[in-house]
Image (tube, rainbow, N blue to C red):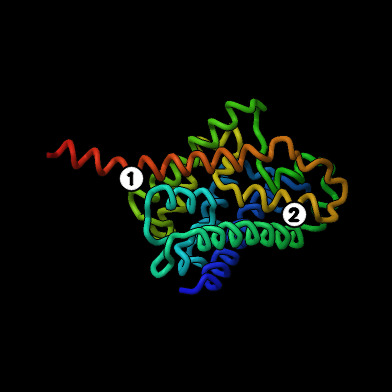
Amino acid sequence: MSLGIVFLSEVFGTAMLTLLGCGVVANVALKGTKGNNGGFLMVTWGWGIAVFSGVYVAAKSGAHLNPAVTFGLLLNGKKEYAPGVAVDFGSTLTYFGGELLGAFLGAVVMWLAHKQHFDVEPEPASKLGVFSTGPAIRSTPWNLVTEIIGTFVLVFVILTFGGTPSGLGPLAVALLVVGIGVSLGGPTGYAINPARDLGPRIAHALLPIKGKGSSDWSYSWIPVVGPLVGGGLAGIVAAVVPIIATAAAS
């Protein structure tokens, strides 16, 4: 498979992810929408369906949709990111680039769909919260720990049971994301994906959103670094566990 196909697959899949995922947050958070005040459970299920859709769209490339997944596969020692896609420097950058661009584009389309509600929403924090995550209690070390743990669960389960998100299956990945959201999502809003947070945050900074306020760049590194650390640790641990199990059995 060519890297061009991989790139487009990840762009479209991650765009679908953020279009529907950020879209459900917009429906819950913005003034006057039909889903206003729908609650956190509505958000978690909406994100699960967003993941389900994104994995289907990007199945050709393995549907990473997330630099933390790509990084986890790299550190796990995989030879291929998807059938016919060798793990090397060029393919790694292709995945990262497609994921970030797709996340940005999906957020832009989401804004277009909710433009009038962004215009009437009085709270800048609600507008930013549609695009990117933020902590319930701001504490750099603990926010980082939460993102590391949540992403570790995501990537470890994917690697242990499916090898890639498309290998685990769209429904299984969707339910996994819902489970992480309802169990671990309260403290930070569970970015568990650097592209999902950074791409829409850049869109928030660039789009002409009325009364949008700050893009909170002081926090922005946490949902990037935390998921990369969590995904990397999951890749390493998932590679070591079968070795330990084999040694114990012998």
Residue 10: percent from the left, percent from the top?
Answer: 55, 64
Of 223 and 247, the residue lying toward us: 247
Residue drawn where x is 49% and y is 46% of the image: 178
Residue drawn where x is 14% and y is 39% of the image: 249
The answer to which image quadrant residue 213 occupies is top right
Residue drawn where x is 41% and y is 57% of the image: 164
Indicate the quadrant containing the C terminus: top left, top right, bottom left or bottom right: top left
Q: Which residue is mark 2?
A: 203
Residue drawn where x is 57% and y is 34% of the image: 186
Crowding at dot 2, Cα within 10 Å, few <14 / some 14-19 / many 20+, comes out as many
Q: Regarding mark 2 in the picture, which secondary structure is present there?
A: helix
Q: Separation of disc 2 and disc 1 at Cα?
A: 36 Å
Q: Which residue is mark 1?
A: 239
Which numbered disc, 2 or 1, marks the residue that appears first in the sequence?
A: 2
Question: What type is the residue that disc 1 sits on?
Answer: Ala
Question: What type is the residue that disc 2 sits on?
Answer: Ala
Residue 66: percent from the left, percent from the top?
Answer: 54, 53
Residue 209: percent from the left, percent from the top?
Answer: 84, 52
Q: Looking at the rendered structure, which numbered label has been put on residue 61?
A: none
Residue 227: percent from the left, percent from the top?
Answer: 54, 42
Q: Which residue occupies the extreme left position in the image?
A: 250
Q: Are marks 2 and 1 in contact (CB under 8 Å)?
A: no
Of 234 and 90, the residue lying toward us: 90
Q: Which residue occupies the extreme right position in the image?
A: 211
Depicted 62 relative to depicted 182: above or below: below
The answer to which image quadrant residue 191 occupies is top right
In the rendered structure, the answer to whether residue 212 lies left or right of residue 103 reads right
In the rendered structure, the answer to whether residue 157 lies left or right of residue 43 reads left
| Total residue callouts | 2
Q: Regarding mark 1 in the picture, which secondary structure is present there?
A: helix
The answer to which image quadrant residue 83 occupies is bottom left
